[in-house]
């Protein structure tokens, strides 16, 4: 099954044995916001210059409705928008789009979205991994990439950056020593990004700005000790 960048991120974010995600939902929300812009960068539809988003005029088709919506919003602005503000807009006001993405994944038999009520009154949702094989294939792939640091394309580097910033290491490895090694390698991959073309540069900028936004907005409030 062919998976989008966003679907890969959300699969890796799910706890392999329990309901929900492996790290706090606020981390997942910002990671999701980064993913949708990362997908636009990988499609060569945007570039990031001085932290602002510029739309590229080319014939590449954007199929996903939310990605098309974001692209149109950025295109219709007179002045280029700052990526950080766009990430925070999704994180704070449009997290329902994350659940729409999860419901699409439910249609592909990857996850199951459960609708519940706290004390029988307050509605909330839980996402549960159902396709453990798809997740295990991804885990195996990224364990290898994080261990040997080779054969990495722009999507791989972008996802590894999000694994690091969203603290998804418990999904990738259980042993503390191995986790530290992978965390060190992930930072090395992002810091030594061999940007040779505009797509790689755009994905790299999305990673860097997401990391800064996460540190100032989410880590500051919830604390890294909560992971």
Image: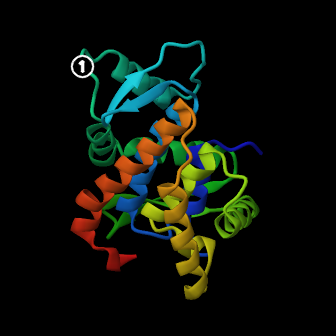
Residue 163 horizontal/vertical position (percent): 52, 62
Image quadrant holding the N terminus, namely top right
Q: Is residue 104 visible?
A: yes
Residue at 55% across, 13% down: 58
The residue closer to the viewer here, 170 or 55, is 55
Residue 26 horizontal/vertical position (percent): 35, 60
Above or below residue 179? Residue 114 is: above
Residue at 28% across, 45% down: 88
Q: Quadrant of residue 97?
A: top left
Residue at 24% across, 19% down: 79
Label 1: how many residues lie within 10 Å, few (<14), some (14-19) or many (20+)? Answer: few
The residue closer to the viewer here, 182 or 192, is 192
Q: Which residue is mark 1?
A: 79
Image quadrant holding the C terminus, namely bottom left
Total marks placed: 1
Q: Quadrant of residue 189?
A: bottom right
Above or below residue 184? Residue 166 is: above
Residue 176 horizontal/vertical position (percent): 55, 86
Residue 128 horizontal/vertical position (percent): 57, 63
Q: Is residue 70 left or right of residue 122?
A: right
Residue at 28% across, 28% down: 81
Q: Is residue 16 visible?
A: no
Above or below residue 142? Residue 75 is: above
Q: Is residue 130 left or right of residue 214?
A: right
Above or below residue 40? Residue 5 is: below
Q: Secondary structure at mark 1?
A: loop
The residue closer to the viewer here, 34 or 14, is 34
Q: Is residue 138 left or right of residue 38?
A: right
Figure colour scheme: rainbow
């Amino acid at each position: 099954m062919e998976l989008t960048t966003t679907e890969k991120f959300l699969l890796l974010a799910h706890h392999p044995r329990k309901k929900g995600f492996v790290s706090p939902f606020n981390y997942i929300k910002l990671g999701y916001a980064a993913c949708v812009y990362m997908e636009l960068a990988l499609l060569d539809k945007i570039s990031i210059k001085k932290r602002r988003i510029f739309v590229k005029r080319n014939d590449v088709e954007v199929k996903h409705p939310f990605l098309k919506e974001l692209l149109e919003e950025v295109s219709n602005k007179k002045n280029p928008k700052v990526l950080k503000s766009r990430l925070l807009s999704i994180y704070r006001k449009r997290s329902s789009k994350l659940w729409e993405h999860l419901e699409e994944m439910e249609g592909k038999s990857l996850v199951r979205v459960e609708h519940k009520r706290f004390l029988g009154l307050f509605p909330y949702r839980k996402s549960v991994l159902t396709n453990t094989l798809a997740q295990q294939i991804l885990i195996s792939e990224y364990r290898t990439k994080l261990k040997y640091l080779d054969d990495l394309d722009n999507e791989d580097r972008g996802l590894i950056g999000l694994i690091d910033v969203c603290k998804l290491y418990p999904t990738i490895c259980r042993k503390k020593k191995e986790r530290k090694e992978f965390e060190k390698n992930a930072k090395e991959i992002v810091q030594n990004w061999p940007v040779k073309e505009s797509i790689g540069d755009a994905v790299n900028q999305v990673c860097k700005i997401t990391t800064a936004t996460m540190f100032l907005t989410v880590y500051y409030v919830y604390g890294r000790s909560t992971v």
